[in-house]
Amino acid sequence: MADGELALLQLNDTHAYLDPHPEVFWEGGGPTFRTAGGYARIAGLVDRIRAETGGKTLLLDCGDTLHGTAPAVKTRGAAMVPVLNALGIAAMTAHWDFAYGPARLHELAAMLDYPVLALNCYDRASGGRPFPPSILIETPDLTVGVAGIAATVLDKVMPPSFSAGLRFTDGINELPEVIADLREAGADLVVVLSHLGLPQDVRLATEVDGIDVVLSGHTHHRLEAPIEVNGALLIQSGVHGSFLGRLDLVVHDGRVVRYAHRLIEIGEGCPTDTAVGALVDRAVAPFRDELVEVVGETAVPLFRGEMFGSSMDDLLLAALRRETGATLAFSNGWRYGAPILPGPIRRNDLYDIVPMDPEVMTVTLTGAEVLGMLEQNLERTFACDPFGQIGGYVKRCQGLVCYVKLENPPGHRVQACWAEGHRLDPAERYRAAFVTVQGVPAGLGAERSGTGITALTAMERLLTDQRPYQGEQSPAFRVI
């Protein structure tokens, strides 16, 4: 076993945010906002760290990288490739990167200078792994084994097209064998590159021996210090490329004997790589005229990052109800989406809310179906078993007020629910609006139909009527 030093650098959940953007920061007085992120800054910071360490640096990406902003979605991920290749990333794993379908992710992976790793992804027909499970990387001092675990939720709660022909496990059963193979091949250090989520990764590291480091993604935590579990160090580094995680390791005889960690804000003081900045400009240029067009104005900051509701999703839901006249509106509890500050709203901001621009739909639900859907969502968010937590934030709702007890057992968390001031009647029928991506589960309800209107058009129409947009008032969920 070799001795040596290594700076591990982590990107996770950048969601294709190419440029600097507003980010929310939680401070003593509540949410504040400042500009963060941008791949030119990330590249400049990584270059500086590489110079500091004499090249004893390894940059890894936990996924949610190729999807999330208009340039990425409009090119089905291709706009990201030149920028990513310029960073010198060693490996990545995936989640929303599957949004264009497995075949397209294979095409994108072939364009990248580094592998997409997924030891828990299997072809349903052949049983084989369509992506490599791991890679062995030589650094100046150490041989590093990197094992990749893609999001286990891909074939469970994501649209079926994401996982067509594939199945995904949680990786716990396969990981010990992959670790053994890496050790046998000469790995001095084993790093797990995961998109399972923080609670799931803690469980993974608890149950699987032999892991030195877990680079965790999916849940957008900003860990100020590593979690130490079963001999492993676990870090996670925010969202939108607003942070870079740095974990400096000293390794002796195959063991980490000393470490230092920093969660680095990609702020105004970061160095900028002008060559990567030019690549970013080239990626955005074909869409810039459309994206900078002012489509409205907001009097309040619009942002995500809260468990039970968000001002950003309130705008989307209000637009769905205005467009359809529905009593209720639902959308997924997405965690990504850069804040929109008071002032002009540009079309790019609306793409950041729902980059896939899904169709606005309507469906008729019974009160019992509404309650069942909410109970399922609360269980998927707060399940005692981390691997039962397969939602994002709590489902976003308008037209409802629900009182919930989170500590209650599954199926009994909603204590009382009202629809427009009246107690929700299990037998009553309610018209609901939603968007096609993760709004109301397929097969639920009756009279499901499309409107021919997309989410962006609906939001633009609302912003035309309400200028400036004043925001909504009451959260749908109230924890008691």
Image (cartoon, helix red, strand yellow):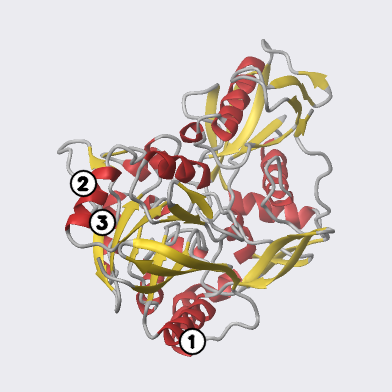
Quick one: label 1, few (<14), some, or many (20+) residues within 10 Å? Answer: some
* In this picture, residue 115 sits left or right of residue 64: left
**Residue that badge 3 annotates:** 134
Could you tell me which quadrant the N terminus lies in? bottom left
In the rendered structure, find residue 129 and report the number of the disc placed on it.
2
Quick one: label 2, few (<14), some, or many (20+) residues within 10 Å? Answer: some
Q: Amino acid at mark 2?
A: Arg
Q: Amino acid at mark 3?
A: Ser
Give above or below for 33 relative to 218.
below
Q: Callout 3: helix, strand or loop?
A: strand
Q: CA distance from mark 2 to mark 3?
A: 11 Å
Q: Amino acid at mark 1?
A: Asp
Q: Callout 2: helix, strand or loop?
A: loop
Task: Name which residue lies at 70% across and 31% down.
Answer: 328
Front-most of residues 304 and 73: 304
Could you tell me which quadrant the C terminus lies in? top right
In the rendered structure, find residue 273 and report the number of the disc placed on it.
1
Q: CA distance from mark 1 to mark 2?
A: 37 Å
Front-most of residues 416 and 345: 416
